[in-house]
């Protein structure tokens, strides 16, 4: 099953194609950056303009390891810019696919 590309931007990182877009979250007051690989193995969401900055891994793979199937939140080791650019999206994809240093968000750190 393919993913819908209408209204989403395409980016190639390495040799893989990803789609990304920013939209208002249906379950919170935040705008979210969403990134997904065409094979749906990597699915990330990132709330914008909140502290601490974190990403939510929703896919089957994160930082080279299989996930447990739950949504897992990880502290970002860099700031989220006010304007989302393809360069930032690429940086986030590289961190989520190549790095191995993700720190989970603890419930006491999470915004309410």
Image (cartoon, rainbow, N blue to C red):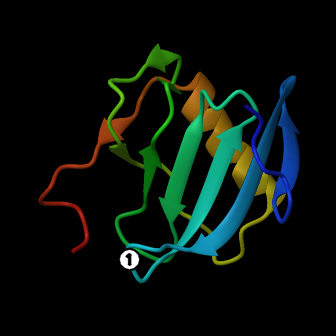
> Quick one: 103 or 3, which is closer to the camera?
3
Tell me residue 24's x, y (percent): 56, 77
Which residue is most to the top?
65
Horizontally, residue 12 falls left or right of residue 44, namely right
Q: Residue at x 77, y 48 (%)?
A: 19
| Residue at the limit of the structure toward the bottom, as seen here | 29
Q: Which residue is mark 1?
A: 28
Which residue is painted at 63% across and 45% down in the image? 92
Most foreground residue, 80 or 58? 58
Residue at 46% x, 51% y is: 55
Please report the residue visible at 35 percent of the width from the left and 42 percent of the height from the top.
71
Q: Is residue 93 above or below residue 29?
A: above
Q: Position of residue 61 (x, y in %)?
A: 51, 24
Picture coordinates of residue 109, whole percent (x, y): 20, 60
Can the viewer see residue 62 in this picture? no
Q: Is residue 22 left or right of residue 78?
A: right
Furthest-front residue in this view: 1
| Left-right relation of 38 to 46 | right
Kind of element beneath mark 1: loop
State whether residue 105 is above or below residue 81. above
Mark 1, Cα crowd under 10 Å, few <14 / some 14-19 / many 20+, is: few
**In this rendering, position of residue 35 left or right of residue 85:** left
Quarter of the picture holding the N terminus: top right
What quarter of the picture does the C terminus occupy? bottom left
How many marks the image carries: the answer is 1
Between residue 109 and residue 66, name the one nearer to us: 66
């Amino acid at each position: 099953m393919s993913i819908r590309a209408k209204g989403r931007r395409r980016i190639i990182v390495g040799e893989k194609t990803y789609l990304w877009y920013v939209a208002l979250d249906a379950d919170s007051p935040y705008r979210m950056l969403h990134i997904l690989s065409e094979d749906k193995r990597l699915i990330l969401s990132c709330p914008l303009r909140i502290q601490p900055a974190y990403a939510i891994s929703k896919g089957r793979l994160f930082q080279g390891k299989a996930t447990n199937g739950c949504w897992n939140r990880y502290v970002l080791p860099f700031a989220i810019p006010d304007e989302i650019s393809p360069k930032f999206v690429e940086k986030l994809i590289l961190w989520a696919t190549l790095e191995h240093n993700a720190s989970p968000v603890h419930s006491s750190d999470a915004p309410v």
